[in-house]
Image (cartoon, helix red, strand yellow):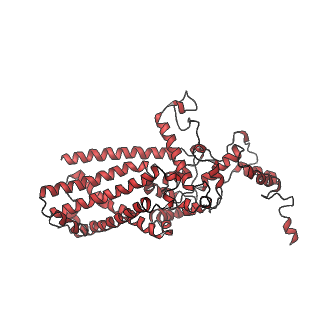
């Protein structure tokens, strides 16, 4: 009875705190501007099934994909045993599904044990890739400090989960004369031969409690970790833009100006637009869309985007992964300041601090340098490489738009191009008509 009460108290506290942290992340994502979601719903679900659940884009690099698949499938199917642990914890029973499912129970737990062994192999391989082989994309400047430690912490937690589950199963097998017949634990249970029933029971309980406590720790660690992607990859792939690669978001005010300049019909010609108050692009989380912020929280930090970025490969400062991580860090900073309710961060000090009444004197340009956004070639290689359909190019373009259209700044090398486009309708400074070539045909 004491264990039941203890379990319910720990589970309630753990789940409650986790829910609170996940709600804060939802709040932070909604700091971004509203963005209408359009397109074929069936295609969105296809993306979820193929990209998020099926891990399709991971298989462009076969070895890490297979290793990742071991961990992913083990994680998903282990939830069956976790369900039993929950039922046992609340009801005070032991292996409640065993008498109900019989031989099928042995098959399910044995399958989970095989997957756990494969997941252990994959986890050791991933630890080796990061810490021994030192794969380059895991050691870029943005991966120093917490991001690098975060990945290792999760891998150590996975080792702990696997250790405790085999400790629980093997001690339980030894205690019950191997009657469960689990396929891996039957080879481990002889380790405990000669051990008394009392100590076996203690070992089984250590495994049981150890496993569930690591699960609770993992759940509460997720909101602070890049591994949040195991949850957010699903909504992120569902809400991913379905527009063709490279199609830029329209700016109606600019479009109408250009149409007016070219003598073309202007949409909503009668509507008055106050150009003085208009801001183009984005300079902070508030002027990005909520989907851009969701992208940031969904990032796996795998670095595939950066590893294919031609700017990064040629030694430029740009790393698409860093751009995405910076957006998440800025959203986190704003969220934490909002939690303080301190009016020093309020635009109007007389009003309560809120997302609509927030000003801390900082912006995304305090995280992302102009050199980084200028280096982007807009080739979409990063967008194509992302295994969870994150679009790092979109916020880069929004930052550029803000810099050029709202601040009237930008690289001096670009000014001749802008002047040519304004005067000639082309990026080249040529005095001939753009369509003059047709006359030579």
How many numbered discs? 0
Residue lying at the far front of the rendered structure: 132
Residue lying at the far top of the rendered structure: 350
Look at the image and tell me whether residue 312 can be seen: yes
Image point 55% across, 52% down: which residue?
A: 322
Image point 45% across, 66% down: which residue?
A: 64
Point out residue 37 in the picture as x, y percentages from the top left corner.
Answer: 57, 54
Judging depth in this view, the residue of 44 and 177 nearest the camera is 177
Residue 187 appears left or right of 248: left
Judging depth in this view, the residue of 163 and 440 nearest the camera is 163
Point out residue 130 in the picture as x, y percentages from the top left corner.
Answer: 44, 59
Judging depth in this view, the residue of 243 and 403 nearest the camera is 403
438 to 6, vertically: above or below: below
Residue 169 appears left or right of 78: left
407 to 71, vertically: above or below: above
Image quadrant where residue 279 sits:
top right
Q: Quadrant of the C terminus?
A: bottom right
Judging depth in this view, the residue of 113 and 76 nearest the camera is 113
Point out residue 260 in the picture as x, y percentages from the top left corner.
Answer: 79, 51
Image quadrant where residue 278 sits:
top right
Point out residue 179 in the picture as x, y percentages from the top left corner.
Answer: 17, 67
Look at the image and tell me whether residue 265 can be seen: no
């Amino acid at each position: 009875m004491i264990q039941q009460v203890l379990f319910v108290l720990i589970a309630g506290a753990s789940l409650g705190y986790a829910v609170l942290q996940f709600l804060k992340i939802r709040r932070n994502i909604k700091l971004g501007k509203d963005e209408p979601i359009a397109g074929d719903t069936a295609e969105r679900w296809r993306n979820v099934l193929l990209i998020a659940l099926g891990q399709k884009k991971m298989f462009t690099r076969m070895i890490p994909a297979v290793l990742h698949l071991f961990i992913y499938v083990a994680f998903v199917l282990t939830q069956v045993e976790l369900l039993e642990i929950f039922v046992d914890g609340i009801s005070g029973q032991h292996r409640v599904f065993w008498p109900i499912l019989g031989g099928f129970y042995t098959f399910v737990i044995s399958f989970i044990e095989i997957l756990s062994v494969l997941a252990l192999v994959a986890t050791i391989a991933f630890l080796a890739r990061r810490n021994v082989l030192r794969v380059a994309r895991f050691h870029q400047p943005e991966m120093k400090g917490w991001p690098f430690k975060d990945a290792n912490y999760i891998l150590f937690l996975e080792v702990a989960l696997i250790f405790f589950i085999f400790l629980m199963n093997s001690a339980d097998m030894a205690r019950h004369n191997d009657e469960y017949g689990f396929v891996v634990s039957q080879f481990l249970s002889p380790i405990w031969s000669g051990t008394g029933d009392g100590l076996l029971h203690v070992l089984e309980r250590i495994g049981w409690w150890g496993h569930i406590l690591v699960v609770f720790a993992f759940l509460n660690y997720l909101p602070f970790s890049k591994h949040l992607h195991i949850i957010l990859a699903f909504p992120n792939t569902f809400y991913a833009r379905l527009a063709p690669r490279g199609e830029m978001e329209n700016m109606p005010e600019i479009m109408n100006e250009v149409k007016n300049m070219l003598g073309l019909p202007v949409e909503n010609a009668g509507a008055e637009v106050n150009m003085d108050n208009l801001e183009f692009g984005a300079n902070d989380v508030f002027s990005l869309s909520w989907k851009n912020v969701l992208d940031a929280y969904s990032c796996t930090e795998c670095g595939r985007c950066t590893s294919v970025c031609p700017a990064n490969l040629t030694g430029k400062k740009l790393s698409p992964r860093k751009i995405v991580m910076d957006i998440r860090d800025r959203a986190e900073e704003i969220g934490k300041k909002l939690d303080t309710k301190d009016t020093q961060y309020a635009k109007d000090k007389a009003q309560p601090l809120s997302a609509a009444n927030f000003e801390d004197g900082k912006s995304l340009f305090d995280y992302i340098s102009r050199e980084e956004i200028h280096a982007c070639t807009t080739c979409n290689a990063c967008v194509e490489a992302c295994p969870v359909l994150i679009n790092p190019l979109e916020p880069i373009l929004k930052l550029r738009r803000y810099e050029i259209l709202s601040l009237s700044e930008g690289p001096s090398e670009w000014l001749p191009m802008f002047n040519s486009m304004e005067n000639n309708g082309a990026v080249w400074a040529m005095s001939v008509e753009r369509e003059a070539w047709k006359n030579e045909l």
